[in-house]
């Protein structure tokens, strides 16, 4: 996957199209990501003891990684991510539009 935890992404399809947020979790085996403020699910949680209160909880659910694009602050839009090798042999991610290093 070309996106990592902590990246800012923009949703390009689905019910939350156009929303931006940070990636909280990456699930590479399922090819899914959890983005803050996107795909909010309602969970009814039962009280598990005297200290924890039950109720309705809103939390983010996973969405497919193909529905998000990396958001480049310089270009102010979603961009593709590529790779480049530096002179010392390190592999870094780059923005395909402006060529800026992301890592």
Image (cartoon, grey):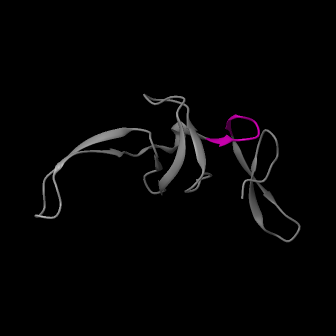
Please identify the residue farthest to the right as the structure is shown.
87
User: What is the x, y in percent for residue 69?
Assistant: 60, 40
- Quick one: 20 or 34, which is closer to the camera? 20
Residue at left offset 80%, top offset 49%: 100
Look at the image and say whether residue 76 sits in the magenta stretch: yes
Q: Main secondary structure of the magenta part?
A: strand
Q: Is residue 8 left or right of residue 74?
A: left
Residue range of the region highlighted in magenta in the rendering: 70-79
- Quick one: 9 or 28, which is closer to the camera? 9
User: Can you tell which quarter of the image residue 12 is in?
Assistant: top right
Residue at left offset 54%, top offset 29%: 18
- Say how many tags the image has: 0
User: What is the x, y in percent for residue 68?
Assistant: 55, 39
User: What is the x, y in percent for residue 92?
Assistant: 75, 60
- Quick one: 93 or 23, which is closer to the camera? 23
Residue at left offset 76%, top offset 40%: 74
* Position of the C terminus by quadrant: bottom right
Please identify the residue farthest to the front as the structure is shown.
51
User: What is the x, y in percent for residue 47?
Assistant: 13, 56
Asked if 84 appears above or below 18 in the picture, the reply is: below
Please identify the residue farthest to the left as the structure is shown.
50
Asked if 41 appears above or below 102 in the picture, the reply is: above
Q: Is residue 93 left or right of residue 23?
A: right
Residue at left offset 58%, top offset 42%: 9
Q: Is residue 99 left or right of residue 59?
A: right
- Quick one: 43 or 84, which is closer to the camera? 43
Look at the image and say whether residue 16 sits in the magenta stretch: no
């Amino acid at each position: 996957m070309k996106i990592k935890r902590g990246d800012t992404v923009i949703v390009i399809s689905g019910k939350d199209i156009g929303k931006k947020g940070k990636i909280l979790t990456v699930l590479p085996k399922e090819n899914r990501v959890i983005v803050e403020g996107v795909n909010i699910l309602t969970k009814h949680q039962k009280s598990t003891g005297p200290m924890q209160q039950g109720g309705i909880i809103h939390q983010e659910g996973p969405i497919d990684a193909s529905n998000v694009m990396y958001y480049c602050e310089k270009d102010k839009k979603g961009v593709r991510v590529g790779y480049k090798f530096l002179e010392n042999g390190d592999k870094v991610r780059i923005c395909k539009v402006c060529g800026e290093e992301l890592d």
